[in-house]
Each structure stands twice: as structure tokens, then as C-alpha cells.
Image: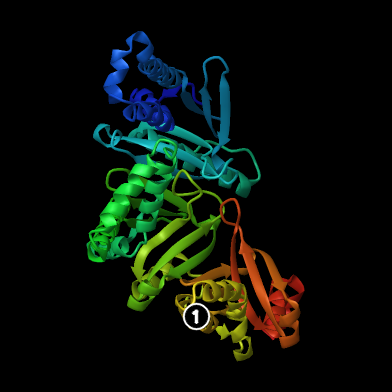
Amino acid sequence: MYEERYKLHPISAFLNFIKGLKELILPFIIIFGVNIFRDGGVGSMFNQGWQGLIPIMVGSVILVFLLIAGIIKWKRFVYWFEDGELRIEYGLFVKKKRYIPFDRIQSLNYTEGIFHRPLGLVKVKVETGGSGKVGEAEAELTAISREDADRIENEMENAKYHLKEATAAMGPVEYVETPAKKEVKVLYRMSIKELLILATTSGGIGVVISAVALFLSQFSELIPYNAIYEEVMLFLRFGALIVVLTIFLVLLVAWVISVIMTVVANYQFTIQRDEDHIYITRGLLEKKKVSVPLKRVQGIKVSQNPLREFFGYATVLVESAGGSIGDKDEKIRLFPLVKKDRMIPILVELFPELEWTPELVKAPKRSVHFFYRLDLLWLSPFLAAAGYFFYPYGLLGLILVPIVVAIGVWQHRTVGYALDEKQLTMQFRGLSKHRFFMLKKRVQVVQVTQSYFQRRKGIASINSTIKSGMMGATATTQHMEKEDASRILAWYEPSGTKEIKS
């Protein structure tokens, strides 16, 4: 169909080098970190003759190897279009070819990093319904021009258009002009106020502290714990007020870092759509654009942590059968943060077949103690041990009892479900409240479980699973009436549809 072969932009060689360097950055830090703690520091390496320079020579050889490998990978990588497929060829000693039919491509996700944007380039990830490992794209074009990216998209749309024509005509396909580019409509742009609220309530401080702890754990053998312990004990002598202020400042710095990270990641968050896809764009330093095929959306999850729930904000996640927003199996956030009254009209436009304000059936009053008694059961030995060995201060642990009971009652009042002919809605809570919206045709599994104690009370727990990513997504409504569980099972079974209607 086409003879012309296309290559990546030469900057791909440098980006391949940077990617390889990132994977080796930790070993490099460890190698040179060892010399920092030696007598004389890094400078002592230059006082030991050629033997002291071995780490530098090895590191230099590795860097040169990575650079040459990046250049070779760029030189040997070509792609072209043929017979309704995106074809890719790469490799030096082992030549590899990958043929991806356009009709299997679910989305083309674009990323503009700090090296792409000045040159007008994008990184393109080709996502299919059967993309391999978790978070791994079917193919990745490291750096191509925006025109080349548009060419791939046009070829994909043209191939799918021809396939539809062939299916309708049930005959040979004649070449026709590519259909006009679909009109894209902007549905939502995150305001600066919403972005700041998202950043301040994101809970990213835990991520920052965990990242620092993980980094330091790599040097556990090099850290002088005895010296640090002595310094800490000396510091504690300054008094409790100074210690508390120091901890507060550390947490404040971690919180500020998390706010900056969230703002940079979600800057200019925008939602657009055409007749087949939702397009999500975000990012300051690295601009990302993810396309979500509407036909691949399996369900919608609306989540609210207690603080956001109090102020009427929510996070909306798309449960999609294939595709992700990052290199990992990240859930796609349709709204990182949005006011609920602003969210509903947009969801109605995107998914008109779903009912967004259903009336929920709540759990029976007699099931309330099931929400907290197991927590109290496993907590009791710890409270008893603390009260016995640390009496009388250990008795302060009893404060946890009313807290656990209160959380259980809170969960009981939240849990519920709604059912109609085509849709199942399930709501539950840990500390955050979650509400799943699922169409019957998207539900993969409905499971009802009953323990011995639940059977005695005539209640049951219900799990509903939809396809999402590699593992699926499950909504759970615990300790509902047994009749409610039977009703949902009957609704899911084909033979039970008529019974629901009546």
C-alpha cells in the first residue's frame, strides 16, 4: 500500500540514552556514594593511582555504551503503513518486526516532554486491547513530529472507515478519501482554584515521605546509625517544643513538595471529546494527552475522601478495558477534582445511558455491628496487652474503641445499591466514599458471599467485577439484606430480566 519508510527524529538517540541512564542512576549513586564516606571523600579516588580511577573508567565505558546503543536503536527503527497495518522494524543483531492492525488500535497517547516541546515533537504510545505487560504499550515511537503523529492517526481512521464500509457492503473495498477529521468539543478545563484545592488535599505528602525513605533504604549499610543516634539524642535535649517545631517543618516541606508535584502534573487539565473518544490533556513540564475510546469504558467510579466530601468535591475515575495514563497500570482520572454539581452535566453528556442520581437501597439496621465487630475482635488482644504491660498509660488505647465503632456506623450508613433494567450502582466506604456506576452488559462477575453469622441474620455481601486494566475493578456492598443479593443475582442472570421488569 505504501513504500515510504518513516524514521524517528534524531533526538530519539539522546532520549534512548537518557532512558538507559535513568535505569542505572541508582547503581551509579551507590558506587560513588561509597567513596563519599571514605576518608578523603571522592578526592581520595584520584590519590590512589589508576586503581582508584576504576569506578570512573567503568562508569565512562557504560555511558559511552549507552550512547552508542541509543544511536543504533534510533538508526535501526523504521515504521510504515501497509495493508491496513502500522508496521515497525527495529534491532541490530536480531531484527524484529511488529505488525499492528489499525482496527485493533484502541488509542494513541501523546506525551510532550521537556526535550520534545522546543522541537515540536511528541512521543506516541500505541495502545491496543491486548497490550502486553501492565502499563506497557503495544508500540512506542520515542520522538516524531506532530505532522507524523497526525499522519498515523489519519491512517488509522482511514483504515477503520474502510473496514466499516466493507462490513456494510459485504464485498470488496474500494479506496475512498479519508473521512473528514472529527470535531472535538471541549467539555471541561480545571480552574486554578480547583487545581490548588486538588494539590492541597491530594495526600501526596505520604508519597514524598515514602520516596525519601525508599531512597535512603538503598544506603542502609552506609548510614552511620550510631552517629545519627547520638545527634538525635543531643537534639532531644533542646526540649519538646523544638522537636515538635522541627517535625512540623519537615512535614510542611514534604507537603509543599507534594503540592508542587501535583500542580505540575495536572496543570491545564482539559477534557475533550468527539463522537468516539474522550481526550484528557494535562501537565506543565511534561504534557500528556490520553485518548479513551468510549466503547472501551466499562464503568465509572466516583470517590470522595472525607475532606473533599465535606466541601462537595469528588474524583472521577474511568474503568477502561485496556490503556493507562502512565507507564504503570494507573487508573485514568476523568476528573482529578471537580464540584459534584459541575460534574453531573458533563457525565450526562459523555454517558447518557447511565443514571447518575439513583435512589439507593441501604443496608438493614440489624447489620450495623458487622461493620465494626471484626475490627474490635483483632484489636482486643493488642489493647489488652498494652493495658497490662504499660498500665496505666496503656489504657489510653481504649480511645480506639469508640473511634472504630464510629467508623463502622459511618460505613453502614454509606453502603447501598441501586438497580434498574440496564444499570447497577454500588456505594461503599473505607474512609473515603466510593460509588460505582456499571452497565449490565459490562459486568463480568457478580458474587454473593455469606458467613455463618450472616446466614443467621439473613444478610449477605455482594461483589460486582468489571474489566479494568489487568486485574479488573470490584465494587462491594457488604452486609445487605439476603433478598437484595438474590435480586442482584436474578438481574444479572439472563433468565431473571423479566422478573425485574415486573
Judge by depth and name the residue closer to the eye, 118 or 173.
118
Q: Which amino acid type is shown beneath numbered disc 1? A: Leu
Specify the quadrant that holds the C terminus: bottom right
Residue at the spot 40% in from the left edge and 46% down from the top edge: 180
Does the rendering let one see residue 271?
yes
Residue at horizontal 50 percent and vertical 80 percent from the top: 398
Q: Residue 206's spot in the image, x, y percent?
A: 39, 57
Other-residue count near label 1 (Cα within 10 Å), few / some / many at <14 / 14–19 / ≥20: some
Does 191 sit above or below residue 214? below
Residue occupying image coordinates x 72% and y 80%: 486
Left or right for 152, reference 50: right
Q: Is residue 334 above or below residue 117?
A: below
Q: Which residue is depicted at the point 33% across and 9% down?
A: 49
Circle 1 SS class: helix
* The furthest residue to the bottom: 365
> Where residue 36 appears, x then y in whole percent?
32, 29
Relative side of 441 to 213, left or right: right
The residue at which mark 1 appears reads as: 398
Nearer the observer, 30 or 366: 30
Q: Where residue 300 sits in the image (x, y, percent)?
A: 50, 65
Of 468 and 181, the residue lying toward us: 468
Image position of 8 with respect to 343: above or below: above
Quarter-of-image position of residue 193: bottom left
Q: How many marks?
A: 1
Image height of 388 relative to 103, above or below:
below
User: Quick check: can you spot residue 257?
Assistant: no
Among the 4 quarters of the image, the one containing residue 384: bottom right
